[in-house]
Amino acid sequence: MSRAHETSPVPVVLAGARGHGRWHVANIRRLERAGLVRLAGICELTPLTEEEAQGELPEQSADFGALLDSTGARIAVICTPIPTHTDLALTAARRGVHLLLEKPPAPSYAEFRRMADGVAEAGVACQIGFQSLGSRAVPAIRELVARGAIGEVVGIGAAGAWVRDEAYFRRAPWSGKRRLNGADVIDGALTNPLAHAVATALALGGTARAEDVTGIETELSHANDIEADDTSCVRIGTARGHRVTVAATLCAERADEPYVLVHGSSGRVTFWYKQDRVLLQRGGHGPEEFHHDRTDLLENLVDHLATGAPLLVPPDGTGAFMRVVEAIRRAPDPEPLPEAAWRRVPGEERRVVPGVDALVVAAAETLSLYSELGAPWAPRTEHPRYEVSTR
């Protein structure tokens, strides 16, 4: 059991309290009621109301550094636009403030390294907000694989078929952008909304660090009127010798639970990471299903500061994911799908790519890219490959 409750509540400042930040407000308030933290400040350009803050208003300011100083914050939760992550993280680190940094941690590998190296030099703890990696299913699956429950791992697939309406891509100035005002954003399906599928697939295969990735192939496209990708897939070569293929779309016919599929020589494990649900299938046995608890990442960070408990998602544990972000950043701009490849759903203001749901599943099952599965809209030219040095 966590011993974090043995200390006084830790003062926390939240940067970015609207949009997805509302989830962080609710989570901080939950931990506040448990006596673990205290919401000491909120950094927003426009101050929150009491209703938005879900309780008594803490100190508020648009000046992040000044707010950290005035509140005596010990932890900063950063849930701001992607291009701001590195500078805000370093602002906190220079003040000795520990971090929960929302995913994706940075829009490029260079910015990620600047953040991670700066945080390490400052000697502060940093947790990256991949909540799926807080699931206790992750070590449980690793244990199943390690003891040979499914034989040798031959590959890992992941599938994410989600539904997003056109308004989703107008929710913020950076939404659906690859660049904004000359700065990288890289807000695509694989790097932001379905980033957990990528990070979880890499983690389950023991490919968490940057040096564990040997090469990356990308196929990026969009049906919506955006710069970034909303229907894409990536195949990652690993130092362990197996492939990781992740297929995603925000233009599904029907929304489905995303999952990661670990293929073994004598069985397979399916992990629905939003549900913490695991299905083990292997020869000579009936299917076995398991449900696991999840450790909240902010609570884990508080526990780390109080007791020295290991961080669940330190920056180095997301280096492989950031290699994927970099490959997508360096790839040619995503191709717009021809109008014949998508349709609008009446009354829902969203675009659908017919047949993409089945393609996403097939990619995870066969570790294939969309073009190899015969998608009529997939590129017919050789797909870009981003080579990664392991030296």
Image (cartoon, helix red, strand yellow):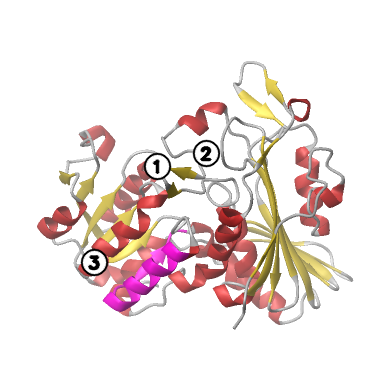
Q: Position of residue 114 (x, y in %)?
A: 38, 68
Q: Is residue 346 above or below residue 55?
A: above
Q: Is residue 116 magenta?
A: yes
- For disc 3, the neighbor class at 10 Å (few under 14, some 14 to 19, many from 20) is many
Disc 1 element: loop
Pointer 3 or 2: first along the chain: 3
Q: Magenta stretch: give its range.
A: 110-129
Q: What residue is disc 2 on?
A: 176
Residue drawn at point x = 36 percent, y = 41 percent: 22
> Which one is in front, 283 or 363?
363
- For disc 1, the neighbor class at 10 Å (few under 14, some 14 to 19, many from 20) is few
Q: Quadrant of residue 72?
A: bottom left
Q: Which amino acid type is marked by label 1?
A: Asn
Residue drawn at point x = 58 percent, y = 72 percent: 139
- The mark found on residue 181 in the picture is 1
Residue drawn at point x = 75 percent, y = 72 percent: 242
Mark in the foreground, 1 or 3: 1
Cα–Cα span, label 1 and label 3: 29 Å
Disc 3 element: loop
Cα–Cα span, label 1 and label 2: 14 Å
- Marks 1,2: beta carbons within 8 A: no
Disc 2 element: loop
Q: Is residue 160 visible?
A: no
Pointer 1 or 3: first along the chain: 3
Image quarter where the N terminus lies is bottom left
Q: Position of residue 153 (x, y in %)?
A: 77, 74
